[in-house]
Image (tube, rainbow, N blue to C red):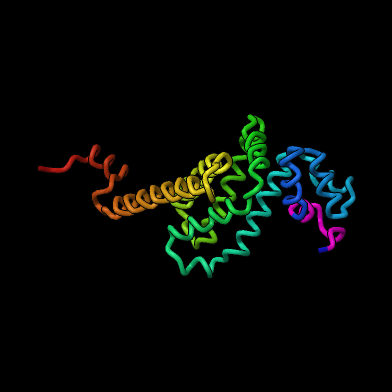
Amino acid sequence: MNMADLSLAELRVALAPTIADAAVFDGWSRTAVEAAADAHGVNRDVAQLAFKDGPMAMIAAWIADIDGRMAHALPMELLAQRKVRVRMGDLVRFRLEAIAGREEALRRAQAVMAMPRNLAASLRLGWASADAMWRLAGDTAADYNHYTKRTLLAGIYTATLAVWVDDSSEGKTDSLAFLDRRIDGVMQFEKAKAKFLSGGDMLFSPARFMGRLRYPARV
């Protein structure tokens, strides 16, 4: 890859993993950007320009790189052969493996993302990652399920990251067990929701209710 031929957007993603490596020691800082630029033979000024929006731009680029790697390693046609529960577990585990060894960079990223001024952008990033995972899993929901699925998955992923970053168990088994429990909970929720929604006439209808208030049933 010739870095000189990349757009600033492409350069951000290309430098992001190396910036994450440097962030372990230097935080999400200009120093980390310069270290990544030097490692790839990129002009420092150009690299700084690419990340002129600061730490959140660096973190967003890191997440975008992981999204891209995930889509390449786990394409939709491969995941389609697996059960939904397995698909979701595989997708989240891939993301966890992608940040293995960079726990300190993740910890520092979480601190940046938790700042009040960054909360809205952080929520958008979490939503985008959840959306990317569900799309790879083959989800085509266009109704409210589109939103509930992504909200639940974003919550699972965020909670698992919080456990993962401080997990000292062998092979991160505690985090993986935590992930499995969360996914099991969502699957049970989806089953219960499907059963409820299949109730047909038993479902509450606001329009029907108002109509009965206006025109009471005859006895």
Residue 200, quarter of the rendered image: bottom left
Q: Main secondary structure of the magenta part?
A: helix
- Please give left or right for residue 70 compared with residue 31 in the image: left
Q: How many marks?
A: 0
Rendered location of residue 133, percent (x, y): 54, 56
Rendered location of residue 76, percent (x, y): 54, 66
In this view, the residue in front, 132 or 147, is 132
Q: In the image, what residue occupies the spot 48% across and 52% down? A: 146
Q: In the image, what residue occupies the spot 19% across and 40% down? A: 216
Q: In the image, what residue occupies the spot 81% across and 63% down? A: 1
- Please give left or right for residue 81 compared with residue 215 in the image: right
- Please give left or right for residue 128 compared with residue 196 in the image: right
In the image, farthest residue toward the top: 116
Residue 168, quarter of the rendered image: top right
Rendered location of residue 202, percent (x, y): 24, 49
Q: Is residue 107 magenta?
A: no
Q: Is residue 8 magenta?
A: yes
Image quarter of the C terminus: top left
User: Which residues are the magenta region?
Assistant: 2-13
In the depicted structure, whether residue 138 falls above or below residue 147:
below
